Amino acid sequence: MTEILVIDDDEIFGQLTVERLEDNYTVAFHRGPFGTISAIRTHDPRLIIMDVNMPGLDGPSVFDLLRKEDSSQDIKLLLMSSLEQRELEEVAARAGIEDALHKSASRSELLAKIRSMLRR
């Protein structure tokens, strides 16, 4: 089982995020958004980190599709984007997503956010 699945259309950011987390968690990257449901089934993550703005299908829309999957009800969802933090939090709240974090967050901020989310 993969603890964290990172989904982003930016492969460089996705791989960088994996590198920032792999000392603490089992992490996989999926270049998305298409094929995300299949990647989730394959990796069976506890937490998904997903970009907001991806071509063709944005993060909140993918999360909406994900919620319709019975097997994904216990997965924690974290949006990461380069949107301003306030706007990002508003997008997350409108979509019913647990939390959001700016892509510029430090490694320690990201780890703290993940620890907090996985304890809930």
Image (cartoon, grey):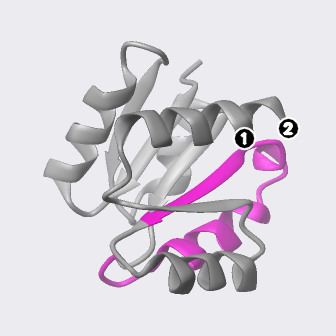
**CA separation in Å, label 2 and label 1:** 5 Å
Counting labels gives 2
Q: Which sits in the foreground, 29 or 101?
A: 101
Give how far across and how far down residue 9 sits, in percent. 26, 63
Where 9 falls versus 13 (above or below)?
Answer: below
Mark 2: few/some/many CA within 10 Å (<14, 14-19, 20+): few
Indicate the position of residue 40 as horizontal and vertical percent values.
Answer: 56, 43
Which residue is outermost to the top? 23
Is residue 54 among what the camera can see? yes
Three-letter residue code for mark 1:
Met
Residue 107 lies left or right of residue 50; in this view the side is left
Element at badge 1? Answer: helix
What mark, if any, has residue 117 been given in the picture? 1
**77 w.r.t. 100: above or below:** above
Q: Which mark is residue 87?
A: none
- Residue 77 coordinates in the image, percent (x, y): 65, 54
Quadrant in the picture for residue 20? top left
Span colored in magenta: 54-80
Front residue of 81/62: it is 81
Which residue is more in the foreground, 71 or 107? Answer: 107
Q: Tag 2, which secondary structure? A: loop
Which residue is outermost to the left? 12
Q: Amino acid at mark 2?
A: Arg
Answer left or right for 49 relative to 29. Answer: right
User: Which residue in the protein does label 2 denote?
Assistant: 120
Residue 56 on the magenta span:
yes
| Residue drawn at 26 percent across, 27 percent down | 19
Q: Is residue 86 magenta?
A: no
Do the residues bearing badges 2 and 1 touch, measured as CB atoms within 8 Å?
yes
